[in-house]
Image: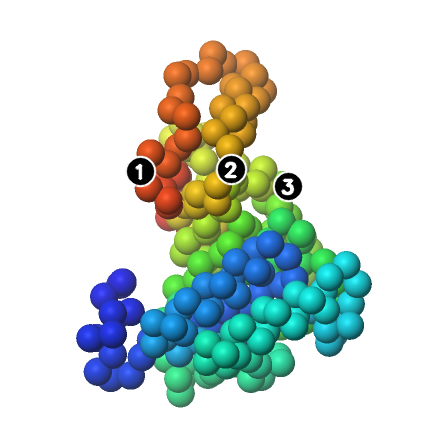
């Protein structure tokens, strides 16, 4: 649990976290998490999937690399080039894997399918708990369905939606027990990233209209005094 990450509990060595990231918002958040964890004496491995651009891409990709990679190196994060550089769970026990490869951009965002497949297979073979950012890699962010019949998706214990959950996470939202589907995202959490209150009110109104239901009274935001809240589903445990 969380106690493992307290410095006083590092007697047998610090915890190990593997961060898998792509070039988009979810990946940038994962790189920030990697820096913070390393600053708290966690042994962090980072694999950034960038389609082989090597920092020479367009639309700010080179700036993304220069700024973010320099920052994680300064924090002591171990950067690796591919899954072969990631620790073997048999030799180097892993506590948590953070999946931010796809995000809302989808794994095809400048990433070779072969690289995505290698990461998915490595993650699913690892017995550590996994946390996905926005959407597990291998699932379509709009439908929640597998992107390919030949490519499995990463199976996380938790998924953190940044601001609002994507439409592909709808099966994980609270539903009547009789209609509750399987939850490939695991337990779903919502993180406060500073969206305006109006965004949540408009989203709730849109859902109520789509379901032809009367919108219940809602608080101005779902967070109250918290920055991370659980969206408790009625479905069975994650697959």
Task: Please name the residue shown 55% across and 51% down the image.
Answer: 135
Residue 113: x and y in percent read 72, 66
Find residue 217 and report its image quarter. top left
Residue assigned mark 1: 225
Calculate the distance from the C-alpha at mark 2 to the C-alpha at mark 3. 20 Å
Calculate the distance from the C-alpha at mark 2 to the C-alpha at mark 1. 15 Å
In terms of secondary structure, where does tag 1 sit? loop
Residue 181 to residue 215: above or below: below
Q: Residues within 10 Å of mark 3 (few under 14, many from 20)?
A: some
Task: Please name the residue shown 49% across and 14% down the image.
Answer: 213
Disc nearer the start of the sequence (2/1):
2
Foreground residue, 149 or 116?
Answer: 116
Q: How crowded is mark 1: few (under 14 residues within 10 Å), some or many (20 or more)?
A: few
Residue assigned mark 2: 195
Residue assigned mark 3: 142
Residue 188 in the figure: left or right of residue 133: left
Task: Please name the residue shown 58% across and 65% down the image.
Answer: 21
């Amino acid at each position: 649990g969380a106690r493992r990450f307290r410095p006083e509990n590092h007697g047998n060595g610090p915890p190990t976290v593997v961060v898998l990231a792509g070039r988009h918002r979810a990946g940038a958040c994962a790189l920030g998490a990697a820096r913070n964890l390393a600053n708290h004496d966690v042994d962090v491995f980072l694999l950034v999937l960038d389609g082989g651009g090597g920092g020479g891409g367009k639309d700010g990709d080179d700036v993304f690399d220069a700024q973010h990679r320099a920052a994680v190196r300064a924090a002591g994060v171990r950067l690796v080039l591919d899954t072969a550089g990631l620790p073997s769970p048999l030799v180097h026990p892993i506590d948590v894997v953070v999946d931010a490869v796809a995000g809302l951009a989808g794994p095809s965002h400048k990433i070779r399918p072969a690289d995505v497949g290698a990461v998915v297979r490595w993650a699913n073979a690892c017995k550590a708990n996994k946390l996905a950012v926005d959407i597990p890699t291998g699932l379509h962010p709009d439908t929640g369905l597998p992107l390919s019949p030949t490519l499995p998706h990463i199976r996380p214990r938790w998924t953190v939606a940044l601001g609002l959950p994507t439409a592909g996470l709808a099966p994980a939202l609270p539903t009547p027990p009789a209609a509750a589907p399987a939850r490939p995202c695991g337990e779903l959490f919502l993180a406060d990233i500073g969206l305006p209150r109006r965004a949540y009110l408009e989203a709730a109104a849109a859902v109520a209209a789509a379901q032809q239901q009367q919108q219940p009274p809602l608080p101005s935001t779902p967070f109250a005094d918290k920055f991370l809240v659980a969206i408790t589903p009625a479905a069975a445990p994650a697959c």
